[in-house]
């Protein structure tokens, strides 16, 4: 199993807004486990945690984002403007032992 952390460092005052946006847009996505905000460490951090059986399943999950299904259009509409809310981002992929 692998765990993926998509990490966003937000502009001041936007972390909770971005976390709420992710939570609403990803509500129907069973891969997304948690959306978290910082309590210690770097300020204004949002981490979206996803879980997959393996790297192949993770790669296949990207195919649904390329589709123009009704669900994807709705999720993208909910995410409108999210790029303006953060300064930088990164992704970490962990293997669960």
Image: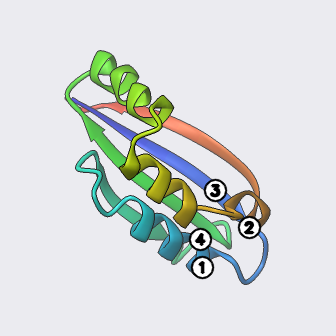
Mark 2: few/some/many CA within 10 Å (<14, 14-19, 20+): some
> Residue at (63%, 75%) from the top-left corner?
15
Q: Which residue is mark 2?
A: 85
Judging from the image, what secondary structure is the residue with disc 1 in? helix
Q: Which residue is mark 1?
A: 17
Q: Nearer the viewer, mark 3 or mark 2?
A: 2
Separation (CA) of disc 4 from disc 3: 9 Å
Comes first in the chain, label 4 or label 3? 3
Separation (CA) of disc 1 from disc 3: 12 Å
> Residue at (46%, 45%) from the top-left corner?
5
Separation (CA) of disc 4 from disc 1: 4 Å
- Residue 55 in the image: x percent, y percent? 33, 19
Q: Which mark is residue 44?
A: none
Tag 1 and tag 2, C-beta contact below 8 Å: yes
Q: Which residue is mark 4?
A: 18
Task: Tell which residue pokes out farthest to the top in this image.
Answer: 56
């Amino acid at each position: 199993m692998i765990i993926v952390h998509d990490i966003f460092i937000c502009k001041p005052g936007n972390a909770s807004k971005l976390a709420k946006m992710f939570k609403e847009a990803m509500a129907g996505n069973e891969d997304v486990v948690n959306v978290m905000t910082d309590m210690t460490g770097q300020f204004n951090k949002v981490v979206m945690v996803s879980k997959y059986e393996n790297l192949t399943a993770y790669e296949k999950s990207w195919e649904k984002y390329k589709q123009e299904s009704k669900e994807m259009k709705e999720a993208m509409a909910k995410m409108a403007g999210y790029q303006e809310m953060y300064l930088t981002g990164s992704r970490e992929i962990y293997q669960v032992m």
